[in-house]
Image (spheres, coloured by chain):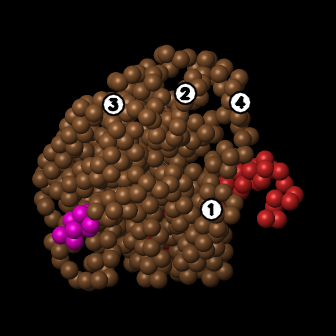
Amino acid sequence: MTDAPLLDAGIAWFLLVAFSVLWIALGVWWGKRGKGDADDYLLAGRNIGLALSTATLMASWVTGNTTLAAPEVGYTLGLWGMLGYALAGLGLFLFAPLAIRIKRLMPTARTSGDFVRLRYGRVCWAVFLLITMAYTLGFLITQGMGAGLLLQALSGFDYRLGMVSVIGVSTTYTLFGGMRGVVGTDFIQSLLIMALLVLVAVLGYGRISVDEVYGALAAEHPSRLNMLLPAGLLFAWNTGLFSMGEVFHNNIWWSRVFASRPSVVFRSFILGGLAWTTVPIVTGAIALMALATNLEVPQVNMVFPLITAQLLGSGGAIVVFIIIFASLTSTLDSLLAASADLIAEDVVAHWLRPGISDAQIRQAARLVVVGLGLLTMLLSWQYFTSMYQLLLFTGALVASTIWPIAMGLYWPQANRQAATAAMVLGSITGLLAYGLVAPYCAALVSAAVSAGVMGLGSHWNPERFEWRLLADR
Amino acid sequence: MQIECCMTELQQALLIFAIGALVTLATVIMIARGHARWHGRDPYDDPNRAAGHD
């Protein structure tokens, strides 16, 4: 951690209060514009257009990890770090065709859990819920920790004050605005993130040219330019497969499919993926400047704030504050809304209290938003590991869902026992690889084992699934 | 582990890189075939079943 904060405490307080009030006001305002029923609260009335859909996908995928961990891996792994992290865009690109199929197959569904329950039965659904809950908690914790670290490094605030503030703001406007509020704020947040990142990159490379950065790296850090760097090779495909696991299974992305108009679903995932891919490349390129200028970086996941503040002075620290605050809140709101949707619909309405009304589902979702917000604060209370290391751990779990989800959407032969076994065995072997080989291999091993089990199991014992069972949730 | 006895660090990394590329490619092919299979069809009428074979 740096000794002196990058931002004056007064400016930091002003930014924190101003953006908190802005997000809450916008979220509540957008939330009041709907009809107020469960579909409106959970899925924004199922009528989102191209611009809002693209923006919410991009903003949700630009996480605190993208703005803090992408520069971290750019700094530690060089070119492979930048390019490898950018491969996480594969998740959004490859989900585009799946999204069309989901939208046409399940016009009234609300969650990814609806699909797994109807397609593979309750045993597989229970395994799936365990995986997605573990991932969601890990993801929420990394965002909470990122919030605390950001405000501590930038403003000198206590870690817990920053963490509680950011989670509190996201929870408040998600609670009152529902999905409509989340999508509306995501639109503003994505525009802010993109505009300010481009500004930082242009100003930064205006001061230090690409040639100078390349020359300094070649002379003093040649490993960062080495495309055969072993750690970089391990990292590359793991990121792509991890992102597929995250996007294919998680209700953040399924809820965006259900919330968007059928005509925009495919294009919004492609455009959202393209917009997102620029972010790790830009932030990674900025991190390379830190290496080229021999900037002292006491904690590697703070390399982006440090180099931006050094290049652009106090204005740079303000820009970083806004970018990361927008990134964290836009991801936290999406996670809270989509997880509340999943828990209210799958756990409460289909398990604990079958037959409850839409109004009760809406009320349950609101309670879950508050509960998850409080739980995230509690679990993030102590900063205990590198954010990215924690996230890689969850990669072992989510990558096991890639083949069961994709095969189950397209192929009637996809077998429910094979899907359950693929998720269980993929997760176990992925976790073993995380501990015994390298964290960077966890998602890759999990996806490989899961794909083998799913493919062979469905080939040997094909199911004859009747697609119309998916028509009504 | 057994693999560490006979391979250098770079060889291990290249092996894992190749496996990753293979799994990614297989996933992309599976999705592309699935998408082509259903493109322009009723989402519930399976083309294989309509043709009389599963």
Residues marked 1 and 2 touching at CB (< 8 Å): no
Q: Amino acid at mark 3?
A: Leu
Mark 1 or mark 2, which has the lower sequence index?
Answer: 2
Q: Amino acid at mark 2?
A: Leu
Q: Nearer the viewer, residue A257 or A87?
A: A87
Residues marked 2 and 3 touching at CB (< 8 Å): no
Pointer 2 indicates a residue of which chain? A
> Do tags 3 and 4 sit on the same chain?
yes
**Circle 2 sits on which residue?**
A295
Instruction: Tell me residue B16's x, y (percent).
Output: 72, 54
Q: Amino acid at mark 1?
A: Tyr
**Residue at 39% of width from left, 71% of height from top?**
A113
Pointer 4 indicates a residue of which chain? A
Q: Would you call the spot at circle 4 few (<14 residues within 10 Å), some (14-19), or many (20 or more)?
A: few
Q: Give the spatial CA distance, label 1 vs label 3.
A: 37 Å
Please tell me whether the stretch drawn in magenta is mainly helix, strand or loop.
helix
Q: Give the spatial CA distance, label 2 vs label 4.
A: 17 Å
Whether residue A340 is situated above or below residue A308 in the rendered picture: below
Range of residues picked out in magenta: A363-371
